[in-house]
Image: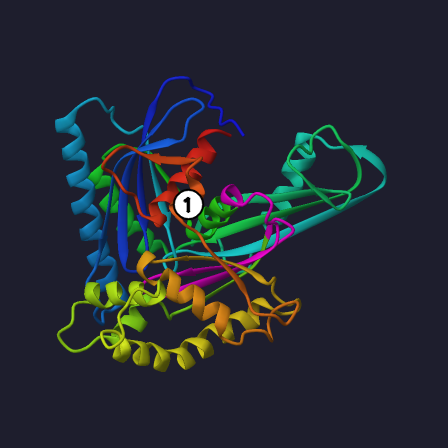
Amino acid sequence: MKIAFRKSHAKTIALAEIGSASAGFALLELSHGCPARVVSASRATIPIEERTPQATIAAISAELLRIGQEAMNTRAKAGGLGRPESLYCVLRAPWSFSESVRADASYKEDVEVTEEMMKALAHQALGRGSVVNTTNFLEASVAQVKLNGYPTGSPEGNFVHSMSVVGLLSGSDKTVRDTFKATLEKLLPHTPIVWRSGARTLIAAIRAAYPHHDEYFAAEVGGEGTVFAVVRDGAPEKQCFVSQGVNAVIRAVSKKGTLPEDTLSLIRMIGRDQCERGACDELSKGLARTEPELMRSFGECMAKCADPRRLPDRMVLFAHPDMAQWLARFFARIDFTQFTRTTKPFEVKTLEPADLARWVEPVAGISPDIGLTIAGTLVNIEASA
């Protein structure tokens, strides 16, 4: 698949990706027919400790400003990169939330689909939000169009007797968004900000990585929470958030005085079967003790997503790279079969940067993590539309 741009010259886009307990910043260079070149990328994670939401937001904002300024200063000294034309900001849960909406139309006889019909039905779908409203609105997108029951990417000009539109509405608390907006305006004054939700970004990246996967259960395990999303027939259906994530596991299993980074490193080795017996025995036992609580919390969320239809067996996992393999084993091994369509365990696929190499390519010496790679994929997809 060739990526085409409306403009032939290279352009620079700044990218901020805000997670539940971290912030990432990257500079992307987009050129006609090429993957987005990542010329700068960094991630800052706030220390694992108990905080109020306001304190967490303030800490993330401070780190975002720091790493963003460092990136801009480094590129300015190096030269050769223009000022960013726009700044994409991806807000992940819990700072953003999403819901799926749908509108259907049927006709007594076949009619030709026009742009006006599409806009009217899309407007009808997006007007049906119950969680997202005018106060907390962040963004909206049309996720799928079906003609006569079949999804299509080119609806205009077809003759149909029925049409449906599935949309994805995303919101964010205005106070939270305004805080991050103030930080971004300090970082890049007078630069247009494009807001995107974590749900829209992840679904777009999964579609890009696995274009033939039209039904799956997505799990995004962040620092301070986990988002589950059901996608059926290529369109998002349900989402659910639970406030259990990577940091809860780290807090539960870390020895007093042990750095979280050291614990994560050991968990990575356990997930890859690279840890020597003895060195990781105690940690493995600690991880086993966390599983019942994770199973309970995740199970409650899965139950909501599985009502009224059971979940697809295929799970696509997005998580901290040090935790990804352990979490993949957890989801595949723990008995969540009461929620799956075939009553079989999940078949877990971990989303990795290599899966998105066709869309995002770092320059030598730069290693964007999976979060920034996913966000960069969305930027490239939208630039090529």
Q: Quadrant of the N terminus?
A: top right
Residue 311 in the figure: left or right of residue 51 = right
Q: Is residue 128 visible?
A: no
- Which residue carries the number 1 mark? 196
Residue 32 in the figure: left or right of residue 304 = left
The verdict on residue 223 being magenta is: yes
Q: Residue at x 31, y 76 (%)?
A: 284
Q: Residue furthest right?
A: 109
Q: Residue 329's x, y, as percent?
A: 44, 67
In the image, residue 172 sits, relative to residue 363, either above or below, namely: below
Which span of residues is magenta-colored?
207-235
State which quadrant residue 324 falls in. Answer: bottom left
> What amino acid is labelled 1 in the image?
Arg
State which quadrant residue 372 falls in. Answer: top left
In the image, residue 288 sits, relative to residue 67, either above or below, namely: below
The verdict on residue 74 being magenta is: no
Residue 302 in the figure: left or right of residue 227 = right
Q: Residue 286's x, y, as percent?
A: 30, 80
Comparing 76 with 167, the one in front is 76
Comparing 111 with 278, the one in front is 278
Q: Residue at x 25, y 33 (%)?
A: 364
Q: Residue at x 34, y 66 (%)?
A: 273
| SS at mark 1 in the image | strand
Q: Residue 323's x, y, as percent?
A: 34, 63
Q: Residue 174's x, y, as percent?
A: 36, 54
Task: Count neighbours of disc 1 (C-alpha within 10 A) and say few if under 14, some if 14 to 19, many if 20 or more.
Answer: many
State which quadrant residue 191 falls in. Answer: top left
Name the image colouring: rainbow
Comparing 361 with 280, the one in front is 280
Q: Is residue 2 visible?
A: yes
Q: Residue furthest front?
A: 277
